Image (cartoon, rainbow, N blue to C red):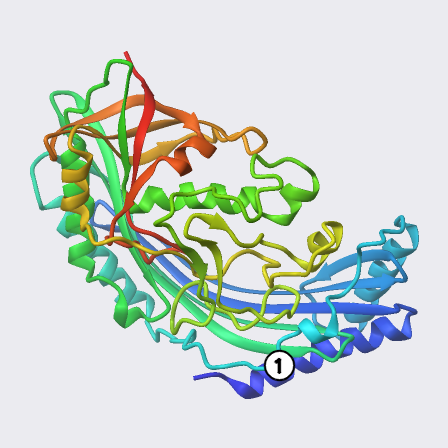
Amino acid sequence: MQNNEEINRLKNLVQDLLDESRKQGATSAEAGLSLDKGLAVTARLGEVETIEYHCDQALGVTVYRGKRKGSSSTNDFSPDSIRETVKAACSIAGFSSEDDYAGLPEQHMLATQFPDLDNNHAWDIEASSAIDIALECEEAARSLHVEISNSEGATVNSHQGISVLGNSLGFLQGGQSTRHSISCSVIGERDGNMQRDYWYSVSRNAQALESASDIGIKAAQRTLQRLGAQSLSTRQCPVLYSAEVAAGLIGSLVGAISGSSLYRKSSFLLDALDTQILPEFMRIHEQPHLQMALGSASYDGEGVATQARDIVTAGVLQGYVLSSYSARKLGMKTTGNAGGVHNLTVDSGENDFNAMLKQLNTGLLVTELMGQGVNRVTGDYSRGASGFWVENGEIQYPVEEITVAGNLKDMYKNIVSVGNDVDYRSNIRTGSILIEQMSIAGE
């Protein structure tokens, strides 16, 4: 349920900022405000480790004096602070150089419809109840097996926020949203070898979270599966990215087709529009208006209306990921992606995870990646990895201390299939992804 009275109060504050900007000589302005509160409880080794309450507020304004831009922010919502914040932004604009591409979005692009996306589900939970959940989660993990020797703790997190966005074109909107999670990380030991792994569940609605005991058990099971890990000899083989790491592969693609990378000419997918970048069976699309999804929004960070659209159809790149500024730099129109994508979805095939393992046959299953070895300019890809060696579609043993390498252009074109084991815990929704061949560096 939206707290309309509070949202209206905050809308009035944003309008005050915009009015003050005009009074102080801004030709146009945009302002945003956020109010966040939450509870985080962590239990470790059967005892409460931390209890954190937070309540934060922030207000920011960007003013334009012609093509000159200045921004300022504050966490003080008083009238005096609003005046001083606008004064600071106007002063900065006076010293900044002109930028022909700066400015507000085009008015006709702004959102005018604001459907209820079911993003707000307050969790009326006391610290004592959160402690009980965290203790239950960790106990389920620690008691699963004698080889679970230590714990990094279990955490229960509840967050509720209100955000308001307005500009001098008449756009003024706000809403509430929530995000709740339970997570657990434990350490296992066998023959002096130690491994750690984790599991978590996240949702707008606490009722949709996995149970605390299930999360703890999964964290422990994943840790136990990694015990006895070994390296591999250097080789080339097929690689299956589990769903939770496959999202990072798609994230690299999003980065390469984002406006800032394109206008800086720092992307390996420069001038790739309307060309084949993925196999023909692949479709990637945005679904910004899904009910209760983590990336749902009716407008982007500039107030531009979001819309369902295909980014890749039949493997062909249909569109970039643009804000108003990057679109102007490229001579294009904004795609409503100031602040990022919204529920980016990779359509999945028919195979579940076990069927994907069968399709992999003999090769590497990657379940964790380390390091930042992705060159967005060239597409060169090299990251530390751990996971499992698979033979004849069956997991044989855990592996660690290896590196998976390739070039993203080739990796994308050599995707063999996408599983239906979709991970819905992030803004990028994809199943496991099988790549025909990559280089593995090991012993």
Q: Nearer the viewer, residue 114 or 25?
A: 114
Label 1 sits on residue: 112
**Quarter of the figure that contains the C terminus:** top left
On the image, the x and y values in percent for residue 136 come to 18, 57
Residue 97 left/right relative to 157: right
Res. 149 visible in picture: no
Left/right of residue 211 with respect to residue 200 in the rendered view = left
What's the amino acid at mark 1?
A: Thr
Question: Residue placed farthest to the top in the image?
Answer: 443
Q: Residue furthest bottom?
A: 5
Question: Is residue 247 depicted above or below 162 in this figure?
Answer: above
Figure check: 414 above or below 432 = above
Above-or-below relation of 367 to 14:
above
Residue at 53% in and 44% down: 275
Crowding at mark 1 (Cα within 10 Å: few <14, some 14-19, many 20+): some
Relative side of 79 to 423, left or right:
right
Residue 142: image location, x then y, percent: 14, 44
The residue under the point 55% across, 41% down is: 256
In the figure, residue 245 lies in which quadrant? Answer: top left
Residue 251 can be seen, yes or no = yes
Element type where label 1 sits in the image = loop
Indicate the quadrant containing the N terminus: top left, top right, bottom left or bottom right: bottom left
- Considering depth in this image, is 150 or 398 the residue closer to the camera? 398
In this rendered view, identify the residue nearer to me: 66 or 159: 66
Q: Is residue 40 left or right of residue 140?
A: right
Which residue shows up at 62% across the image and 59% down it? 338
- The number of callouts visible is 1
Q: Give how far across and how far down residue 223 sits, in percent.
A: 19, 37
Rendered residue at 67%/64% (across/down): 75
Vertical side of 8 occupied by 363: above or below = above
